[in-house]
Image (cartoon, helix red, strand yellow):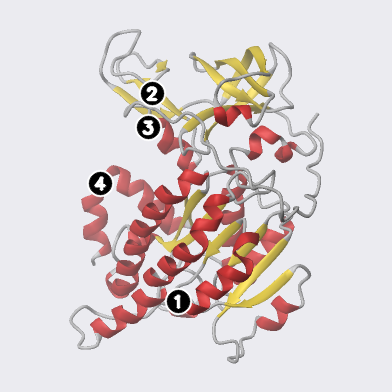
Amino acid sequence: MTGPLPRPKRKNPLARTTQPLLPPQTRSRKAHGFTLAAAIGRFMLQCCGECGRYAYPAREACPNCLSSALTFLDAPTGGALLSETRIEVTSDPYFREHMPWRTGMVQLDCGPVVVAHLHGDCGGPGARVAMSLQLDKAGQAVFFAKSVSETPHMEDDPQWRQLSADPKYRRVLISDGRSPMAVALVNALKKAGAAKIFVGVAEQWKPFEERTLLEAMEGVEVVDLDLTSERSVQELAIDIGAKVEILINTADHVRPAHLFDASAANTARDVMDHTVMGLMRLSQAFGPVMRSRGADGATGAVAWVNVLSVHGLSNARQFGVHSVAHAACLSLSQWLRNELRQGGIRVINALTGPLDTEWFQTVPPPKVAPKALADAVVDGLKRGLEDIYIGDVAKDIEARLFDNPKAVEREAGR
């Protein structure tokens, strides 16, 4: 049975920080269908359009009927453990740091046999397991098998924590305490067991209603952080950069403007400075030290979360500047992901529909409540996802973009 994760001891400042290593990451282009499924939390395998059989590993033609009509579809997650291997010695540098490591052969209910990483609570051969696709430290999809029934301290399994970004006992920075989602995020993170939560606030002399509530919470510290000031971001990074294991960027600047307005360019400049350039300043200040701490013990640096509008994928005319800025943030986030992956840091894009706030007052329902967004972000951290779609609007746009991007473009422009 998995034991509870011990609270980490204070680190010896003279001790060497373990250098991050990555597991093997070579994959075929076809196998990146598994990467897509793991990134959004789905279990998908290739399924033949002719004979209906599931296939593994990824290939160009069905091994049963030789049809080329192989597409990735959702598959049943059940399976039976055929055999297990406890690896004690390996030549791979990454896994050498995490010995012993359990792997096993699993017979999936849908047919194929796969090699999977095993949770510590999985039974012996013949036991039923629940399968999932997870992203490893290198950002590649791997199979993971868990016990079908919940067990105590299940989330504390060492192998599972290598494939997730659980906030338990980790220190978190939320970039904008004035955001309507800040208090909800703090509550969700505290419930998940975060050790310390830093909340950035710009222009602290300006009062805001939630400040008293934040300061009264145990384990929460309000810090000075103005994303429009490079000096402010750099000073905070010098102060707490080596303490942050999860960074959640909630900065936003919603200002409606029409493209042909005389002031549209000035509005766009302000929005870009708060969002796009704010994210770049954060990346330059906090990114290097987080990347260097990707293997710093059981609670080392693990994830960077960007809360973005789903309209960065599909421009909403009434919030055109907002959509453009978040499209740029999405591209910058992919750039950041490529940089942080070298340290095993997961970059998560939380793409949300319109929030239930005053800036989206004129937008008809459904909207996303701050608590729903916070719960989705924490759930994504615990499950090790890479892209989270939050709310009915975001999930609808995600599904329609897979089907017909042009239809989404035309309908969003009305």
Q: How many numbered marks are there?
A: 4
- Residue neighbourhood size for the residue with mark 1, other residues' Cα within 10 Å, grouped as few (<14), some (14–19), many (≥20): some
Q: Residue furthest top?
A: 64
Mark closest to the chain's N terminus, 1 or 3: 3
Q: Residue furthest left?
A: 260
Q: Label 4, label 3: how many angstroms apart (C-alpha)?
A: 21 Å
Q: Are marks 2 and 3 in contact (CB under 8 Å)?
A: no
Q: Give the residue type at disc 2.
A: Gln
Q: Give the residue type at disc 1.
A: Glu
Q: Which residue is mark 4?
A: 404
**Mark 2 element type:** strand
Residue 167 rendering spot, x and y as whole percentages: 66, 52
Q: Which residue is mark 2?
A: 46
**Mark 3 element type:** helix
Q: Label 2, label 1: how many angstroms apart (C-alpha)?
A: 47 Å
Mark closest to the chain's N terminus, 2 or 4: 2
Q: Which residue is mark 1?
A: 230
Residue 16 rendering spot, x and y as whole percentages: 66, 47
Foreground tag (1 vs 3): 1
Q: Which mark is residue 32?
A: 3
Res. 247 in view? yes
